[in-house]
Image (cartoon, rainbow, N blue to C red):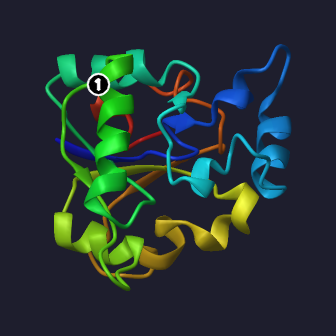
Amino acid sequence: MRILVFLHGTSIMHAAGLGLGLGREERVRQSRERETSVLDFASLDFASYVPTDRAVEKLNSWARHGAQIEYLSSHRTREDVAIDEQVLASHGFPIGPVHWRADAESYEEIVRRVGPDLVVEDDCESIGGAGQTVASKLGGEQGAVPCCIVPEFGGLGHLPNDPADLVRF
């Protein structure tokens, strides 16, 4: 099983989101308001990003169950994706390719091109909600890739340990 996991907001987030007692709603607010820590965009440096709740252990569990983990970045250049790869490696995420949008490519076009068995993405609450998800863009297509949608910045800890159970989740 090949699982394509979104990075920003789904499996990694801005470091300030870890603030003492901050809940998911506050992280969404930080993102909506483009707080400085969210916008390491000023230098296009996301190196300070950290895993969302239990993302590393969940993805490693899926890998132990035989899943091939791949990632989808919001970045558009090889240089910026290299930073994502450093963040993933430094936090112990399973090794897998990081895909990104070239030119005017959309996320759903990447999903079609990559052809995963499942997509794990967040609900895009800070950027407009469900209508922004890959699931909403692919929903009506014949043979569309199944999508598992999690709350933005909510982590992956609540998902099943066996990736085969994700299709039913």
Q: Residue at x 80, y 47 (%)?
A: 35
Q: Position of residue 132 (x, y in %)?
A: 60, 71
Badge count: 1
Q: Position of residue 64 (x, y in %)?
A: 19, 16
Q: Residue at x 50, y 46 (%)?
A: 45
Relative to residue 99, is residue 106 depicted above or below?
Answer: below
Quick one: SS at disc 1? Answer: helix
Task: Decide if residue 10 is in sight here.
Answer: yes
Q: Is residue 126 left or right of residue 79?
A: right
Q: Position of residue 74 (x, y in %)?
A: 45, 59
- Which quadrant is home to the N terminus? top left
Q: Residue furthest bottom?
A: 104
Residue type beneath disc 1: Ala
Q: Position of residue 4 (x, y in %)?
A: 30, 49
Relative to residue 93, is residue 42 depicted above or below?
Answer: below
Q: Nearer the viewer, residue 135 or 142?
A: 135
Q: Residue at x 58, y 45 (%)?
A: 9
